[in-house]
Image: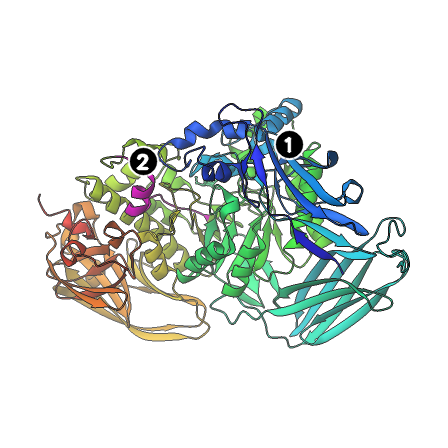
Amino acid sequence: MRSVRPLHDGWSLRSSTTTEVPAAAVPASVPGCVHTDLMAAGLIPDPYVDDDEQRLAWIGRTDWVYQTSFEHTRADRVDLVCEGLDTVATITLNGVEVGRTENMHRGYRFDVRDALHDGANDLRVEFESAYAYAERLRERLGDRPAAYDQPYQFIRKMACNFGWDWGPTVVTAGIWRPIALESWSTARLARVRPLVTVESGTGRVRVEVEVERAADGPADPVDPADPVDPAGPLTLAATVCGVRVTAGLAAGETSTTLELEIAEPALWWPRGYGDQRLHALAVTLATAEGEVLDRWERSVGFRSVRVETTPDAHGTPFTLVVNDVPVFVRGFNWIPDDSLVSRVDRERYTRRLTQAAEAGANYLRVWGGGIYESDDFYDAADSLGLMVGQDFLFACAAYPEEEPLRSEVAAEAEDNVVRLASHPSLVLWTGNNENIWGWHDWKWRERLDGRSWGAGYYFDLLPGILARLDPTRPYWPGSPWSGSTDRHPNDPAHGTSHEWEVWNRVDYLHYRDHVPRFVAEFGFQAPPAYATLRCWLSDDPLAPDSPGLVHHQKAEDGDGKLRRGLEAHLPTPRDFDDWHYLTQVNQARAVGVAVSHHRSHRPVCMGTIVWQLNDSWPATSWSAVDCDGRRKPLWYALRRLYADRLLTIQPRAIQSHRDGLALVAVNDEGVDWSGRAVVTRYTLDGEPRATHTVDLRVPARSARTCALPDDVATPGDPAGELLRAEVGDLRAWWFFAEDRDVAYPPAAYSAEVTPTVDGLLVTVTAGTILRDLTLFPDRLDPAATVGDALVTLLPGESATFTVHSAQPLDPAALTSRPVLRCVNDIAVQP
Ligand code: BMA
């Protein structure tokens, strides 16, 4: 039986090519990376603190040696199995070179039998500087345009490691995924590829199996008295849902297919559409005599998936259809959860994906500048019912198609397509992030002057690999991609699009200018939570332009865009606390305009994916959750916007009402929704001026638009009135003027704080309107959390916030600025 022995102990790390740290070796963590080892040894500061990133750039330009030793007894075949090496490595065992690598995104297996000694063995993994390799290839293959002045498209390594508009430049090296010795005899399961389909209620698992036989005859059998012929007949068995099939492999054969058919299996559904039923699939390899040689087991889920792209009256849809049900995608873009990505463990993946699910998302797009996500990520997605679109790893650059890169791309694609095949959550493969768009629009063509840029990957190599290895999942050549080379790749009326005019150039109300079919990226920035800033920055005082904040804002003119975005909508901040709160409110408002617009246009629009869920370090960024896992107000806003039932007031030209308003009710549930909606025009003092009642009937998985009559939709005084729509607990608001122009009264309220077992209940009763009331308990206890945010109250109404904290919190501090905020507390004159 194949045995696996992890080699995670006894490692040390050193370098002979730098004088920045002593030459003596330091203990190394495996899996891990140089940065975390040097930090643990106290030799470097944390690159996420202040601007320490800048002092550590030399790490990426240095060569590093990892070394360990282990005791070993010989076996028939012994392989060194590296699930991930970052990146350019030479591996020696007892002074004998056993392998070389140049791709972080694939696994490697080296037959090390001949280099092993009985007893102690010396294993070294020497990493060449990623820059040295990439710059060498750039020199050889000719430069190519890219969004950043770094050679990331010349090496198969996580691109954002070289710095991004939300992330630091921390060019890592190290053994970033598990490494092990595998001992086996006769044969092993080299590749198991389960292809799961469902048709008319019948589930099928086609298990494609490739076997490796111990090389060329019984070399060095452990027990010479009992040699098993490694070329002899073998048997395979596969089991799922109690169904078992077997197949024989004749002498010398190395591959076969096992087909399992399950009548009416319990299906896997995206969350909100049904349960996430997973079933164990086991494959065993044995000799003809029945001796088990290897075993493989994964969870699979039965579901069908396709993308509907048949042109219609509006253009070209992009509608995911799972188990024959069209699914409205409410998603987040996902980036590596840490720039030092080897630190992200199973627990952290589960926590972060749970935050996405709890915000109401049903989809994550794994962006192409990161990694092919780990099985821990996909396991969490499988059980949470989060659908995943995985980009192949190409982002914002022209990528050379010459060797050695072409073969590396093919190898990594094959590896990962096979590795991820069992996960039902994976519903889409995408060729790249913004590269077709870049070629089209960003003057790449001129600069390339005929050189390759990646088209061969996106239109030929990658779809070819999928057709061969996993035809069960749809493929789309790019994000964005309009479905045809005859059209602009980012045409919102066709296929997938990215909306970046807002944020970069125009106000967020322009999200409403068109009705996109499926928006795979759009977003707006805000700073991270206050406690996160305080943890990582020593700025004193904190200010929008204090050095740490400036260093942790990586986007081009990011602070200018934040400021202009604010000026158009909200009162002028008087101090840092105002700026911090208002920029976070503005982020939530901007994304809210987009999401409610997109959802209100179901079924023309069938997907909205916010850029971005998470952060890889403490950053002012587009994220909803910051690097320390703290939820920004945007997260709470999305939880309302991504709920199955959404009520929203939208400007709509309906019949004669060219500047009219409409109430739109969106129902993503599988059952009809009926209720009585009351829409009232109020003064800021809470006086009703006009009311309209609508009997809503919203069939399952649809949206209904109801024009509002003029007496409700037309204010007497735009700066002093608002609309509120209510159905049950759901509310929608419409303000006729921007907050900076609204004649808000200074905020008045009373607050009551009641202790609970693990925190406090804070009940706020409004004396005046309170706009976007939000509590920031992390300002008092960094570990404190709150249950809701951005609650608007009319005079006399109250809201209760649940605060969790292990510390006693001062009630007075908890219920006043800067912990308790609303937009109209800015109206209070200091
Ligand atoms: C798109 C993404 C990312 C980037 C984001 C914000 O270009 O694909 O590359 O971080 O916008 O600018």
- In the rendered image, residue 47, in percent from the top left (x then y), is placed at 42, 35
Q: Nearer the viewer, mark 2 or mark 1?
A: 2
The magenta region covers 521-539
For the C terminus, the quadrant is top left
The reply, left or right, for residue 592 in relation to residue 376 is left
Of callouts 2 and 1, which one flags the residue occurring earlier in the amino acid sequence? Answer: 1
The disc labelled 2 sits on which kind of residue? Leu
The disc labelled 1 sits on which kind of residue? Pro
* Colour approach in the figure: rainbow
**C-alpha separation, residue under disc 2 versus residue under disc 1:** 36 Å
Look at the image and say whether residue 50 sits in the magenta stretch: no
Q: Residue furthest front?
A: 119
- Bin the neighbour count of mark 1 within 10 Å (Cα to Cα): few under 14, some 14-19, many 20 and up: many
Look at the image and say whether residue 536 sits in the magenta stretch: yes
Circle 2 — which element? helix
- In the rendered image, residue 685, in percent from the top left (x then y), is placed at 11, 60
- In the rendered image, residue 765, in percent from the top left (x then y), is placed at 14, 64
What residue is disc 2 on?
549
The quarter of the picture where residue 291 lies is bottom right
The reply, left or right, for residue 520 in relation to residue 775 is right
Residue at 29% in and 51% down? 782
Does the rendering let one see residue 527? Answer: no
Q: Is 589 located above or below residue 131 in the figure? A: below
What residue is disc 1 on?
400
Q: Residue furthest left?
A: 829
